[in-house]
Image (spheres, rainbow, N blue to C red):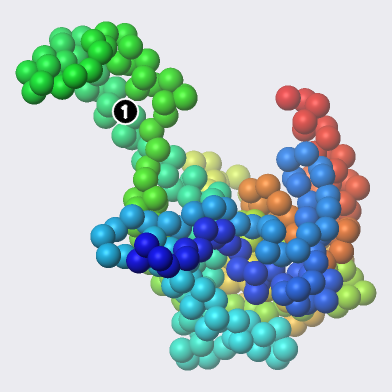
Amino acid sequence: MNNIKLKRKHHFIPQTHLANFTKDGTINSRLWVFDSLNGGQWESKIREVAHKRDLYRVDYPEVKPDIFEDIFGEIEDKVGPIIRGICDKLLMPMSDDYIWLMNYIALLAERTPARREVISKPMEELQKLFIEMDTSASEYHKTIMKEIYEKGADIDNISYEEHRKVTFEDEHSIRLDNNTHMKNLLTAIDAIIPFLIDRNWSVVYCPPTLGDFICSDNPVSLHWVEDKDRGIYSSPGYGLMGTEVSIPLSSRVMLLGRFEQVHPVSGIIPSRRTLAILNSYTGMFCDMFIFSSKNDFFWYTAKNKIGNIRDFKQIVKEEAESK
């Protein structure tokens, strides 16, 4: 296994998916990248974006460290033709192809670094809380240090204050290992697949005369259908009624999934306003980057107006200046 060349650049948005947002719709074409944190914008090859080194690497005996990258690649190869069929016919697949597509959407929703942070943060905070409980009393610290010395460990004497400092300072923050991250990822995928399968899906088409759908580095968005005050239940869940899942498949095609019956199951979006609203869902959930086939895109502003890239950059600038 030591002689096997491992994949180190792990793409969390498949290159075959991003290809649908390039100028020519091909994997060798280029797309526009917009940085939502600083307002930067540039053209890029798709292999240079939406990846992270060793993101899915695991450490198990007799298992290839990049085995998950291989598995995800097999799923992408299987679903690629299914997505092309949806874009060509504007119809949802049936039977096994439908199940494959739902698995792909679940994977795409949960495999990004942004989702990893959402899942891991509470677990890391909980572990830190347990450690805080264990180190809250100096007498407990003395007992631990005594046991270490009795076992013959050759270490410097660590004071109670130093022990707590190492435990709680940010530079020594608790981090889950990648094996745990991957277990969490698989659990999260299994949890949402049934709710994706049970939704009623619409295929919506955007004609070039209106503009283009955008993609992002966290492209599957989950949002409420109606914008209203829900009190403590303000966060949507994959199993809740009144929610919608949206995922852009290409610059021309997007999927929308609700539990309620939706009609029609496919159609052309009626206006640029609708395009702007759908793009806003995609942009709102991005971690950092937005991808587009052109250097401009439409979105719906907080003032209920259609905005473009210039308006987006202005918002980013204002937010940066306010910090």
Q: Quadrant of residue 164?
A: top left
The residue most toward the left is: 150
Q: Is residue 273 left or right of residue 117?
A: right
Instruction: Please say if 237 is above or below 192.
Output: above
Q: Position of residue 262 (x, y in %)?
A: 62, 77
The residue shown at (85%, 43%) is 313
Instruction: Please say if 300 is above or below 292.
Output: above
The residue shown at (74%, 55%) is 290
Label 1 amino acid? Leu
Q: Secondary structure at mark 1?
A: helix
Q: Quadrant of residue 33?
A: bottom right
Residue 245 or residue 220, whichever sits in front: 220
Residue 7 visible in rendering: yes
The residue most toward the front is: 3
Residue 77 or residue 93, whichever sits in front: 77
Q: Position of residue 92 (x, y in %)?
A: 60, 86
Instruction: Please say if 226 is above or below 97.
Output: above
User: Which residue is identified by label 1?
Assistant: 129
Residue 221 visible in rendering: no
- The quadrant in which the C terminus is found is top right
- The quadrant in which the N terminus is found is bottom left
Count of marks overlaid on the render: 1
Q: Is residue 243 left or right of residue 205?
A: left
Q: Position of residue 135 (x, y in %)?
A: 24, 18
Q: Quadrant of residue 67?
A: bottom left
Q: Position of residue 115 (x, y in %)?
A: 51, 52
The residue shown at (64%, 52%) is 285
The residue shown at (83%, 58%) is 43
Residue 263 or residue 27, whichever sits in front: 27
How would you rate the neighbour count of disc 1 (Cα within 10 Å): few for under 14, some for 14-19, many for 20 or more?
few
Q: Is residue 162 left or right of residue 173?
A: left
